[in-house]
Image (cartoon, rainbow, N blue to C red):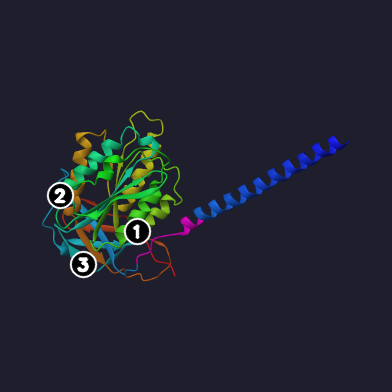
Amino acid sequence: MIKLSFEKSRSIERSRNIGIAAFAFLILLGAFQSAIAQNEDEELRVDSSIVLLNASITDGGGRHVSGLRQPQFHVFEDGVEQPIEYFSAELTPFAAAILLDTSGSMEERVSMARAAAIRFLDRLRESDSAAIYRFDSKVEIVQPFSNSRDLTPAAFDLKADGMTRMNDAVYEAAVALSNRPEKRRAIIVLSDGQDTMSGRSMDKVLKSALAADILIYTVDMSPVGNSKRAQNQAALKQLAEKSGGTFIDTPGGAAMRDAFEKIANELGTQYTIGYSPLNTKKDGKWRRIELRVAKPGLSIRTRQGYTAEKK
């Protein structure tokens, strides 16, 4: 009888411990979900009444078109032409953040991404500035903003491991760039596109980048033959196309290094146009932007719009 009571007592104790553990798990899960929700609500806001457009203008052969003047440019917001208040052409300083994916899925391609970053730094002018970030299960700055053409020793010790926080990395770079004095700003992402851990959605990240007038260039690092390659590319393409940047699909090697050299050259020779929106409502709605140039046969690439501030 005593033995049965003892076994029953142990059973009750085990049940109680399981219940406490389950309750603790639910509390932790709720805290984790709350943190994600908080990140989702967090959005970079830049207090500015001027909308800036950084535009790349090319001819039919893909060559940069120089010599265009302000009267040749016309900006439309939701179909309404806007008065241009700021115009800059050609050699204007830029700031760029290079984001290197060092998650476990990038194990065989980290050195390739690093080589491309070196090629980009080689094209920096004295007035330009660039920073290097890494992202996997965490986001970490490897090299602060500077005009140095050399990588720090830490960049050569990068190892692939962990999950992927691509969206969070883009957001952190956008925050850093929003505080830069340069009017031309860019984020360059080298990744296989498999975001598996970010607390921020693609939509939130894009809004933050657009608020800070940032172009996003994305480079697909996923191996050919990967069953999820098309899906991964879709995320990278969305970041690039909606911000006015470029998506690059290259097998690596010389083609990738050349692509990075082209990005650096493009950032230094864009046209920057600024205007104060005639629509001053702070309603948080999307404003569609169209840039036109009074010269036929040209291709114009810039961001598609922005989200208005909300009271």
Outermost residue on the front side: it is 2
Q: Residues within 10 Å of mark 3 (few under 14, many from 20)?
A: some
Secondary structure beneath disc 3?
strand
For badge 3, the amino acid type reads Tyr
The amino acid at mark 2 is His
Decide: few, some or many residues near mark 1? Use Cα within 10 Å; few <14, some 14-19, many ≥20: some
Magenta run includes residue 62: no
Vertical placement of residue 274 versus 147, above or below: below
Mark 2 vs mark 1, CA separation in Å: 30 Å
Q: Which stretch appears magenta?
A: 37-46
| Numbered mark located on residue 64 in the image | 2
Query: Which residue is the extreme one toward the top?
Result: 225
Residue where numbered disc 1 is placed: 175
- Identify residue for label 3: 86
The front one of 294 and 242 is 242
Q: Residue at x 34, y 38 (%)?
A: 159
Which three-letter amino acid code belongs to the residue tagged 1?
Val
Residue 77 visible somewhere in the drawing: yes
Q: Based on the picture, tell me whether residue 45 belongs to the magenta stretch.
A: yes
Q: Earlier in the sequence, mark 3 or mark 1?
A: 3
